[in-house]
Amino acid sequence: MVLFPLGALPREVWRIGGKNALELPSAEHVYQAEQRLADLLDNLDPAQPWTVEVVVPPPSKPKPRLAIVRLNGQTLLEVRPADATALGAGGVEELANAWKRSLNHLFSQPALRQYLVVANRMPLQITYQGRPYLLRGEIAPDRGLFRTNGKKIAGRVIFWEIPPDSRAYQISPTPPSEPNQPSTIYLLHRRLFFVPYQRS
């Protein structure tokens, strides 16, 4: 989608959660935006609405006029006159408000919010017992059935889920035996919930 058909053509598309989100002036802009979003996701609740707003500080010399796009009150993007020119926008505020509308539409989707929080700083694919496992963008309910023998892959402990039978909550002095190529394995997220990976 071209936000502004006049002027220079956009050079980079920022994809968020696999969806085209914004057109940014350069790959460096995309990298910076991804890093800022990753930092913000560490403290965002996917179950609560996310709000995108535009703030335009008063210009001061020698700094040029700029607009700030904020996500839940924290800076996500800064729009400078050179960005507006590169994308053919009429000014920083026009471009910032176009980005705001696109991001508000994107972040209004609960499934996408959950995927972003779950996938943040997690590998999208891991190899376990010689088979690839792909991240599922959801939080696994913790019923006390996750087990591990401490085995790690890429520095992360692998968990699996046992059946909820009469022995499920018995304490054993020996580590549980590792299942052979289970359909789903789990990693513990830095925010202390379990993330499922499905065998592909």
Image (cartoon, rainbow, N blue to C red):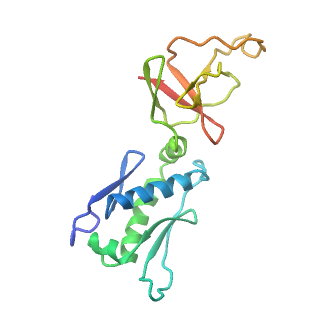
101 versus 169 height, above or below = below
| In the image: residue 75, left or right of residue 173 | left
131 is higher (above) or lower (below) than 118? above
Q: Quadrant of residue 82?
A: bottom left
| Position of the C terminus by quadrant | top left
Residue at left 71%, top 24%? 144
**Based on the displayed image, in which of its 4 quarters is residue 127 positioned?**
top left
Vertical order, 157 against 2 (above or below): above
In this picture, is 84 found above or below 198? below
Residue 139 in the image: x percent, y percent?
A: 58, 35
Q: Residue at position x 30%, y 78% from top?
A: 90
| Residue 183: percent from left, percent from top | 49, 18
Residue 169 appears left or right of 184: right
Residue 15 appears left or right of 197: left
Q: Nearer the viewer, residue 93 or 171?
A: 171
Question: Where residue 107 sits: x, y (%)?
Answer: 48, 54
Q: How many marks?
A: 0
Q: Which residue in the rendered view is the most extreme toward the bottom?
A: 61
